[in-house]
Image (spheres, rainbow, N blue to C red):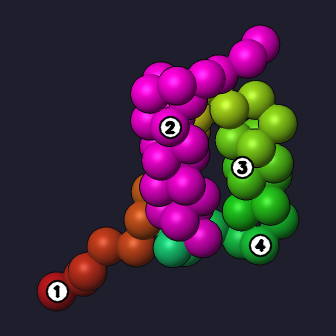
């Protein structure tokens, strides 16, 4: 599948945001690596799966 133009740029930005959120989450290092690989190998599908079931970013407790 090829992503080009504005759609590809938007998908790239969303994937970068997802990867930053993955590394900012509190899950184990192994889980971070697996989620990152999923998003990188399957850009659109991986992002959608991460959006639905992925680790969330660190939240402030208080």
For marks 1 and 3 on the same chain, the one whose residue lies earlier in the sequence: 3
- Label 4 crowd (10 A; few <14 / some 14-19 / many >=20): few
Q: Quadrant of residue 27?
A: bottom right
- Residue located farthest toward the bottom when viewing the structure as drawn: 62
Secondary element under disc 1, as helix, strand or loop, is: loop
Region of the chain picked out in magenta, as a range: 1-23
Cα–Cα gap, marks 1 and 3: 28 Å
Q: Which dot, 1 or 2, sits closer to the camera?
A: 2
CA gap between label 3 and label 2 equals 21 Å
- Magenta run includes residue 54: no
Q: Residue furthest front?
A: 5
The disc label shown at residue 62, or none: 1
Q: Secondary structure at mark 3?
A: helix
Closer to the chain start, of discs 4 and 2, is 2
Is residue 6 depicted above or below 55 in this figure? above
Point out the tag, 1 or 4, that comes first from the N-terminus. Answer: 4
Instruction: Identify the secondary structure beneath mark 4.
Output: helix
The residue that mark 4 highlights is 29
In the displayed structure, does residue 7 sit left or right of residue 37?
left
The numbered mark, 1 or 2, whose residue comes first in the sequence reads 2
At label 1, counting other C-alpha atoms closer than 10 Å, the crowd grade (few under 14, some 14-19, many 20 or more) is: few
First in residue order: circle 4 vs circle 3: 4
Main SS class of the magenta portion in the image: helix
Q: Position of residue 34 (x, y in %)?
A: 81, 52
The residue under label 3 is 35
Identify the mark nearer the N-term, 3 or 2.
2
Tally the marks. Answer: 4
**Disc number for residue 9:** 2
Alpha carbon separation for disc pair 4 and 3: 10 Å
Residue shown at 24% from the left, 82% from the top: 61
Marks 1/2: CA–CA distance: 37 Å
Q: Is residue 27 above or below residue 61?
A: above
């Amino acid at each position: 599948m090829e992503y080009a133009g504005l759609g590809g740029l938007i998908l790239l930005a969303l994937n970068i945001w997802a990867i930053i959120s993955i590394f900012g989450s509190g899950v184990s290092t192994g889980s971070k690596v697996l989620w990152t690989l999923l998003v990188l190998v399957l850009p659109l599908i991986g992002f959608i799966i991460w959006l639905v079931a992925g680790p969330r970013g660190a939240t402030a407790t208080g």
